[in-house]
Amino acid sequence: MKGRVDRRELLKSAAAGALALWASPRIRGQEAAGGVRRLTDKLAVVDGGGSNVVAFSAGDGLVLVDSGAPKSGDRVTAALQNGAGASNVRTLFNTHYHLDQTGNNELFAAAGAKIIAHQRTLQWMSSDYWVEAEQRYEKARPKAARPAETFATTGSLQAGGEQIDYGYLPLAHTSGDIYVFFKEANVLAVGDAASPVRDPALDYFTGAWIGGRVDAMDIVLHLGNDQTRIVPAYGPVMTRAEFKAERDMMEEVRARLFKQVREGDGPKDMLEEGVLKGLARTWKDPEKFLYDAAKGLWAHHDKLDPNVV
């Protein structure tokens, strides 16, 4: 009986300690900031107007991965102040050029942040381009929103005792996707190269395609270990096992689509023949996904089979 009482007392003490930690002003402030998920003492994921913003506290300022959606600047800044203890951003990585990940670039650049991205992200942000799905032109971003520093393959920097490695993820989602790896924290930000809650998107007009996406996901898997946490552009932080499951599902889709395209099928044919059935996920707009995937596959027809011309 005494052993049981001691165990109950131990559990009560542990629960009280956890409650005290949860109720501390610092933790309360983070939760009240509107979607701050702390991963380590120095690193958190902040709600950037629906998309994820990764914030690392380097002592003399913050390192961010992506800046959030347009018009979310006040929310992001408040969350950084409450959740990371600072709002002065020294370095800002853009995982790709899309507006929902780069919408507050101007805000942080005006305050002194240096924006780093792949060189093709700068190209897309510097040019007008046609958005076929919406039948409109997207104007080039203002110069203040564009990256000040670009790279082609990989790079690295030190900040606040953290080694931050970054590199190219070829043709995963756009032509300029990158990862940012906080090695000491063992946290990898991969932008839209992972998509746990949204339909995987392929900007075929930039060169992105499903084969490139699988190859890029393999690069990510080789960077970390079983304890690595992976932050997508949207949705929850993923374990390596969860990311690998998504990668394996995308490889299955890739194999099915290769076969269908070789047969001459279009997106509607693929959908009607059930090419996306029996998978571990469903698509919100399967026809759009298949349309984009098919366009990308034909752009990379030389990788399908020697007899496809």
Image (tube, grey):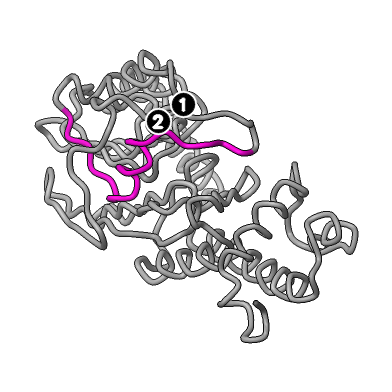
| Rendering coords of residue 225 (x, y %) | 38, 68
Q: CA distance from mark 2 to mark 1?
A: 6 Å
| Rendering coords of residue 131 (x, y %) | 56, 36
What's drawn in magenta, residue-wise?
Answer: 113-132
| Rendering coords of residue 31 (x, y %) | 43, 23
Residue denoted by label 1: 35
Instruction: Tell whether 256 sits left or right of 20.
Output: right
Residue denoted by label 2: 46
Determine the secondary structure under disc 1: loop
Q: Nearer the viewer, residue 182 or 106?
A: 106
Type of the residue with mark 2 = Val
**In the orientation shown, which residue stands out farthest toward the left?**
60
At 40% from the left edge and 30% from the top edge, which residue is drawn? Answer: 46
| Rendering coords of residue 24 (x, y %) | 34, 22
Determine the secondary structure under disc 2: strand
Figure quadrant of residue 152: bottom left
**In the orientation shown, which residue stands out farthest toward the right?**
272
